[in-house]
Image (cartoon, grey):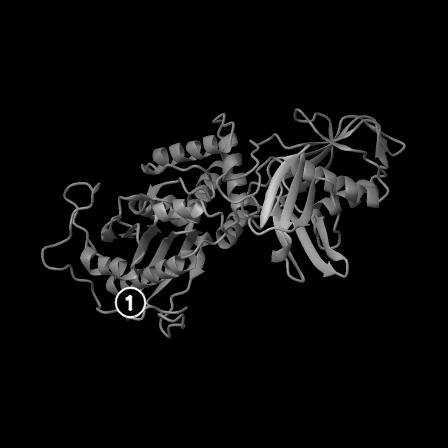
Amino acid sequence: MTASAAMAQAPLTALRPRPRPGGAEATDAAPSGLRPVARDSTARFVEEARLGGRTGYVALDARSGEILDQHDAYTRLPPASVAKSITALYALETLGGDFRFDTTLVATGPIENGIVQGDLVLAGTGDPTLDTDALDGMVARLKEMGVRGVAGGFAVWGGALPQQSQIDPVQLAHLAYNPAVSGLNLNYNRIYFGWSRGAEGYELTLDARGTNSRPEVGLATIEAVDRGTPVYTYAQQNGRDVWTVGRRYLGDSGARWLPVRRPALYAGQVFAALAEAEGIDLGPVSEAASAPRGTVLLRHQSAELTRLVRDMLLYSTNLTAEQMGLAASVARGTGVADLPGSARAMSDWVEARFGATPELVDHSGLGGASRISAMQMAKILADPLSREELKPLLKSIRLYGPRGEALPKPPGVVVAKTGTLNFVSALAGYERTLGGRDVAFAIFSADVERRIDAQDDEEERPEGARSYNGRAKWLQQRLLQRWGIAYEARAQTTN
């Protein structure tokens, strides 16, 4: 990291923060009578970070809820992927840590002489981790059963959960972290785009890449064209994803994932291609209008929800967050019909469960219109449910010096969820201070106007976004390190 003059200052300038003379200014929406500890002392970190927009943060005693430090803590800002912490709690309480997503192969008639006398339907309940390898395994088991074909048709069913072609319609079309959501998903609803330059031009491929198989499907096409910007264009034509890419951006060779907009059909085409390679003729794939009724021939299960949550928080996978949030809303019987409706149902649950009132537009935090204050987020984290269920699943956050160097004795142990969008940076979790105090904290920074302006440029990483993120992360480091040395464990009293 290239440190600015402000960032190069030592973050630990005093053992205990001291308010400036005159006390702290009142926040706009703070309840009367609250006077945060050390607000002005750490508020200068915000000034020195020169982020623009607004920054709100708060540190609470994780057990008592006592406010230890705060700045603009009641301002509602985008949480980015910190929202996944809320989704984790929502899913764990609703579905239970042992819950698993099912993907089944259903026959509507008996098997006679290797032929299914009826339809064969691949049906999902929302597994976000289903991949080509899993389908390959299901095909191998189907072959072991002696199935060679189907008398009726082969269909897919993705309607167990609300379906949507993108998580956030504002994002650029080619971003693989903004895929479709559905009851039937595959490869995180992405297709593998590879290219190499040959003597006669570029060879472009699209496949559903697995460990041992690389089936190609007819769902998507791509063409290299001569143009400046944009790098990619997308259109849906006759039910197919039609992509173009600017030839000048390809170089000699490379690869990346592109999102898929009809994931259930994608999964069906891949399954049919894998089956054909094993001598099983399923014919063309269609999308079923309703849930299949018949005999379950095969069942594939995801890992248990606790593991899915841990991986989601570690790798910040948007699709996993959306699928488990949707599954929780459906299980609660909220009657949701779409992703925004499920996000509202989760927001209502947060209000009933924690007394906080966020405005969430999805379950992953990808949508920049979501809002929650640092105070609300920290109070959610300080709740006993969160400390018991969420805290053990959060990833460790390293504390480092102003140039990224490891600290010989970190002034605290931190587990948290990060969140990043262009001109948005968030961090929320727990810190065990050097003095043994457990702190629940939330730090949100966002320049919303700059983010909105940058979206008009149609750039994946607009100018200034990287440096904003770096300054915001250093601000988070300064706060965590100050809190780590400032707050000691509360004295224990005995009767």
Vertical arrangement, residue 159 with respect to residue 462, above or below: above
Q: Quadrant of residue 250?
A: bottom right
Report the residue at 41% width, 48% height from top.
388
Q: Residue furthest right?
A: 113
Q: Nearer the viewer, residue 405 or 225?
A: 225
Q: Quadrant of residue 272?
A: top right
Query: SS class of the residue under badge 1?
Result: loop
Report the residue at 34% width, 51% height from top.
444
Q: Nearer the viewer, residue 256 or 386?
A: 256
Kindly tell me whether residue 330 is visible in this rendering. Answer: yes
Kind of residue at badge 1: Ala
Q: How many marks?
A: 1
Kindly tell me whether residue 490 is visible in this rendering. Answer: no
Residue carrying label 1: 6
Q: Residue furthest front?
A: 227
Vertical arrangement, residue 66 with respect to residue 470, above or below: above
Q: Position of residue 440 (x, y in %)?
A: 32, 52
Position of the N terminus by quadrant: bottom left
Q: Position of residue 88 (x, y in %)?
A: 46, 44
